[in-house]
Amino acid sequence: MKRALPSMLLAGVFLLLVGGGCGGDSDSAPQWSPAATGSDLPFAPRTYAIHRAAAPIDVDGRLVEADWAAAPWTADFVDIRGPDAPTPRYRTRAKMLWDDEALYVAAQLEEPNVWGTLTQRDTVVYYDDDFEVFIDPTGTTHNYYEVEVNALETVWDLMLLSPYRDGGPAIDAWDVRGIKVAVHVDGTLNDPSDTDEGWTVEMRLPWSALEEAAPEGRPPQAGDQWRLNFSRVDWPLTVQNGRYKKDLDTTKAHPESNWVWSPQGVIDMHRPERWGIVQFVDAPAGTDTVNVQVPPTARIKWALRRLYYRQRQYHDSTGHYASSLSALDAADVKIQGRPFTPTLQTTQSMYEITALGARGTTVHIRSDGKTWTSTE
């Protein structure tokens, strides 16, 4: 039985403002800070075609099946902030497969010092070096999953009803029921006396758990696209009394390194609008090449997201949301190759911005950050 997901409904009477708006904001607009939101990084989510597994996958961390050999690796991970940040010290890459029962994820992490300390399920695993999977089945940026694992195969899995910036909450009690995780260490775990090659992660994530927040409450079908990202946390180490110890620079807000598949623009994985786009393909790996396209709706959502960022900055500066698009300088938010004429509706405490989408649809974003598409 699927658990009911909470919904937030906008209520009350709206003030409707079309296009650039009719004014009404006495406060001057703040200076927009794209760097603070990461919106200065161009919208270019990475893409991946997930092929079907033709034979059963034995989750043992070794990736010996023919399907794994045929599945392509993702592009190498980059710094979470984007290409202008330092190149990661060690290589990380991932690959995926699917069948009627589950999503399969594999990752290869180059690492000369494989270590881990945490062994309790649902502890904060990223306090160790870890590998993380983030999945937003609907692309709304709400009701998404996070799964983390360290080299000791300790799992932290949770569901977030919305990103932390929008109030969360994170549901730690939620589990990927039936999850299987295995780690293979190419070297020796927690032994500073030698140099390791790295570690490999393999996961089986059943649809019976992932379908909970999926479109129509079902597993994906061929052609469906989900938003997804991977992250790797890597801590600086020293050796003390023959044991690894974190070597922290306490002058840094983030002494750890954060490496990801699709860059976020800022050090924050909980910005699902930045995650990559994966598409489910019926053909087995190695038999068909699929070029995954970023759909027009995703670009419209990104333009609306930029206005959402400005509304947040406006609210931080004035104590209330702008009631006109002109107060947000919305005219300078554009989509290459298509018109973008948003509409703003406000109440005293909330807002919703909409824009025309593809094939007669309407794309929405509201003050709690949720985005969606309607056909009415």
Image: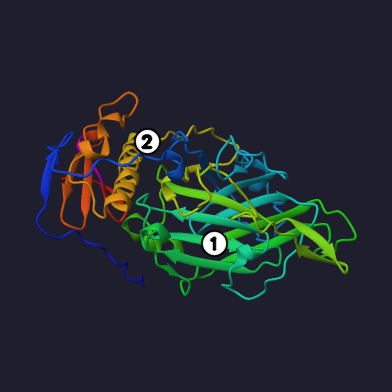
Res. 257 in view: yes
Q: Quadrant of the C terminus?
A: top left
Number of labelled discs?
2
Left or right: 95, with 116 as reference point: left
Q: Is residue 362 magenta?
A: yes
- Rendering coords of residue 323 (x, y %): 18, 46
Give the amino acid at mark 2: Pro
**Which numbered dot is residue 295?**
2
Give residue 89's quadrant in the image: top right
Which quadrant holds the N terminus? bottom left
Q: Position of residue 236 (x, y in %)?
A: 73, 55
Picture residue at 36% right of the left edge, 36% below the top: 299
Q: Is residue 195 left or right of residue 306?
A: right
The amino acid type, in three-letter code, at marker 1 is: Val
User: In percent of the image, x 90 and y 60: which residue is there?
Assistant: 193
Residue 152 position in % (x across, y down):
71, 67
Residue 139 left/right relative to 114: left
Magenta range is 360-364
Label 1, on which residue?
Answer: 147
The 10 Å Cα crowd at callout 2, few under 14, some 14 to 19, many 20 or more, is few
Residue at 21% x, 51% y: name it: 351
**Residue at figure coordinates x 34%, y 54% from the top left:** 215
Percent across and percent down for residue 344 are 18, 43
Q: Earlier in the sequence, mark 1 or mark 2?
A: 1
Between 222 and 259, the residue placed more toward the observer is 259
User: Farthest residue in the right direction?
Assistant: 193
Gap between marks 1 and 2 measured at Cα: 26 Å
Of the pair 218 and 145, the residue shown nearer to us: 145
Q: Is residue 35 magenta?
A: no
Query: Element at badge 2?
Result: loop
Callout 1 environment at 10 Å: few (<14), some (14 to 19), or many (20+)?
A: many
